[in-house]
Image: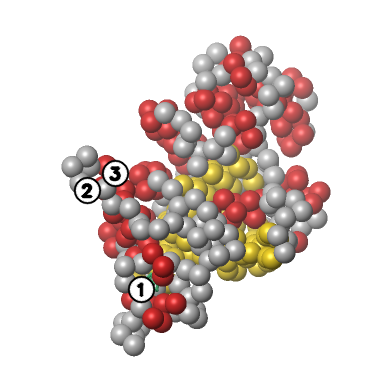
């Protein structure tokens, strides 16, 4: 199933955390649309704001540390950032679902997986126990778990990593969500299991027309899964494009660094390429273009003020003085 209707419209999303005596911005003015049946990948190194973006959309930021996010997250005409928590709780786990790198952050270790799936079905779909059980069996079956009736009485610790991930996906998709957020869903798995789990997510997403926000640092996963990509660095979007345009013409020096390091990792003979330096710690993002201390093309003007946006082609935008309309010559 494929249609282009916008499920979630995110505008100028900004999230800040209180750290020590200061306030630091962890998501900076981010805008994008998530469409039915399509996958948007958020890419970048750890600490760039990808997961904070997901937690902001779901409103599950760390309590006592995060300030309320600003901007708009429009779902069916309502700004989720202003929705009462009670209504938000109803949406989470039903229409807006999330899967994490660690399945145990979603699964309860002291409940059987059957009880957990049935609880979701009873709570969100208002099913009677027998119907909830049938729904749970169906959900396990749909994620490729054999003999699902028998698995209902298993506890999470009795399952392999790949099986736990499948159960988490079954739980996330049980209520047929409009949006699925997957945060590094396969990073902790063996390579062969990774491929199976990604294939499963893609198949279920396409069958159901779910919008998928995929968070990853792995360009191989992006190539397999994404329709559109946003490359994030230091809480900001650096480059965004349809996936083929990004792979053919990545133009931002940070994106180029990500691609170069990926290629060198894939080929044993190629010299190892790494982006020099590291992502600055929270609260220490540099002024100007935040990538300038690591950028081989940095100019004086990159070190202060806003970087003007540039458009390379339809839907392909980036934030870099090299591509600004004056060509970065001044
Ligand atoms: Fe490099 Fe300057 Fe472009 Fe930033 S704006 S990526 S520092 S050239």
- Residue at position x 54%, y 43% in the image: 182
Q: Which quarter of the rendering shows the C terminus? A: bottom left
Distance in Å between CA atoms under marks 2 and 3: 9 Å
- Relative to 5, is 123 on the left or the right? right
Find out if the beta carbon at label 1 lies less than 8 Å from the nearest ligand 1 atom: yes
Distance in Å between CA atoms under marks 1 and 2: 24 Å
- Residue at position x 60%, y 47% in the image: 178
- Relative to 81, is 204 on the left or the right? left
From the top left corner, tell me how far across and down residue 298 is, in percent: 35, 73
Find out if the beta carbon at label 3 lies less than 8 Å from the nearest ligand 1 atom: no
Crowding at dot 1, Cα within 10 Å, few <14 / some 14-19 / many 20+, comes out as some
- Residue at position x 71%, y 32% in the image: 120
Label 1 close to label 3 by CB (< 8 Å): no
- Labelled disc at residue 271: 2
Label 2 close to label 3 by CB (< 8 Å): no
Q: Where does label 1 land, which residue?
A: 298
Residue 167 versus residue 133: which sits nearer the camera?
Answer: 167
Crowding at dot 3, Cα within 10 Å, few <14 / some 14-19 / many 20+, comes out as some
Q: Where does label 3 land, which residue?
A: 265
Q: Secondary structure at mark 3?
A: helix
- Mark 3 or mark 2, which is nearer the start of the sequence? 3
From the top left corner, tell me how far across and down residue 115 is, in percent: 72, 22
Q: In which quarter of the view is residue 303 placed? A: bottom left
Q: Secondary structure at mark 1?
A: loop
Which quadrant of the picture is home to ligand 1?
Answer: bottom left
One can see residue 70 in this view: yes
Q: Secondary structure at mark 2?
A: loop
Q: Count numbered badges in the picture.
A: 3
């Amino acid at each position: 199933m494929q249609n282009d209707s916008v499920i979630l419209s995110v505008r100028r999303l900004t999230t800040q955390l209180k750290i020590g005596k200061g306030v630091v911005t962890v998501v900076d003015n981010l805008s994008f649309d998530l469409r039915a049946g399509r996958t948007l990948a958020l890419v970048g190194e750890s600490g760039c704001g990808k997961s904070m973006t997901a937690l902001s959309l779901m409103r599950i930021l760390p309590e006592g540390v995060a300030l309320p996010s600003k901007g708009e997250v429009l779902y069916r005409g309502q700004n989720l950032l202003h929705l009462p928590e009670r209504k938000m709780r109803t949406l989470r786990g039903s229409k807006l679902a999330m899967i994490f790198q660690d399945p145990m952050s979603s699964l309860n270790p002291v409940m059987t997986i059957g009880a957990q799936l049935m609880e979701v079905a009873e709570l969100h779909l208002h099913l009677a126990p027998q119907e909830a059980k049938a729904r749970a069996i169906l959900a396990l079956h749909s994620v490729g778990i054999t003999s699902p009736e028998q698995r209902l009485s298993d506890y999470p610790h009795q399952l392999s990593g790949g099986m736990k991930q499948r159960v988490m996906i079954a739980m996330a998709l049980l209520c047929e969500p409009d949006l699925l957020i997957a945060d590094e869903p396969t990073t902790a798995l063996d390579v062969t299991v990774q491929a199976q789990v990604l294939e499963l997510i893609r198949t279920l997403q396409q069958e159901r027309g779910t919008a998928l926000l995929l968070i990853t640092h792995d360009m191989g996963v992006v190539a397999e899964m994404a329709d559109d990509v946003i490359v994030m660095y230091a809480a900001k979007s650096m480059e965004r494009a349809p996936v083929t345009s990004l792979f053919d013409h990545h133009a931002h020096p940070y994106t180029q660094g990500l691609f170069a390091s990926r290629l060198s990792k894939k080929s044993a003979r190629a010299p190892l390429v790494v982006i020099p330096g590291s992502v600055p710690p929270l609260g220490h993002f540099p002024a100007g273009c935040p990538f300038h201390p690591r950028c081989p093309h940095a100019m004086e003007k990159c070190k202060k003020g806003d970087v003007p946006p540039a458009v390379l082609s339809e839907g392909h935008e980036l934030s870099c003085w090299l591509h600004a309309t004056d060509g970065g010559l001044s």
